[in-house]
Image (cartoon, rainbow, N blue to C red):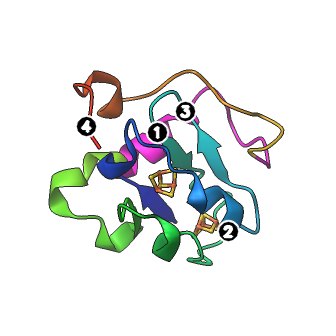
Amino acid sequence: TYVIAEPCVDLLDKACIEECPVDCIYEGGRMLYIHPDECVDCGACEPVCPVEAIYYEDDVPEQWSAYTKANVDFFDELGSPGGASKVGKVNRDVEPALSLPPQQH
Ligand code: F3S
Ligand code: F3S
């Protein structure tokens, strides 16, 4: 799977959403999260993010390693809806984004 990391927090550019062929990038309160089971590893989202927030799971920078788990934890309550557009924005986040101070962009 691919993982969205800290640069997305409080920016939510959403260019990535347009690229995903399986609609597996879900909007939380302060960032977006990629569904680890629904992502088919096409990689289309990664180059379009203007702040390089998206990484293949094996390439997540060390300082953002907690975001790999965040992209899993976010779906604890949602399960696998099979499409982000029908779910819409979910006004909730998980750690570490949940406790992160406001981010300047
Ligand atoms: Fe976030 Fe980048 Fe997508 S800022 S919403 S991961 S394009
Ligand atoms: Fe979609 Fe990106 Fe995965 S475009 S299928 S979330 S690699």
Q: Amino acid at mark 4?
A: Gln
Image spot of residue 53 (x, y percent): 37, 59
Q: Which mark is residue 28?
A: 3
42 relative to 1 in the view: left or right: right
Q: Is mark 1 within 8 Å of ligand 1?
A: yes
Helix, strand or loop status at disc 2: helix
> What residue is drawn where x is 34% and y is 72%?
58
- Category of crowding for the residue at label 2, using alpha-carbon neighbours closer than 10 angstroms: few (below 14), some (14–19), many (at least 20): some
Identify the mark nearer the N-term, 1 or 4.
Answer: 1
Image spot of residue 67 (x, y percent): 34, 47
Identify the mark nearer the N-term, 1 or 2.
Answer: 2
Quadrant containing the C terminus is: top left
Question: Residue beneath label 2, please?
Answer: 19
3D distance between C-alphas at marks 2 and 3: 18 Å
The residue mark sitting in front, 2 or 3, is 2
Q: Are marks 2 and 3 in contact (CB under 8 Å)?
A: no
**Furthest residue in direction right, as rendered:** 86
Helix, strand or loop status at disc 4: loop
Residue bounds of the magenta highlight: 68-83
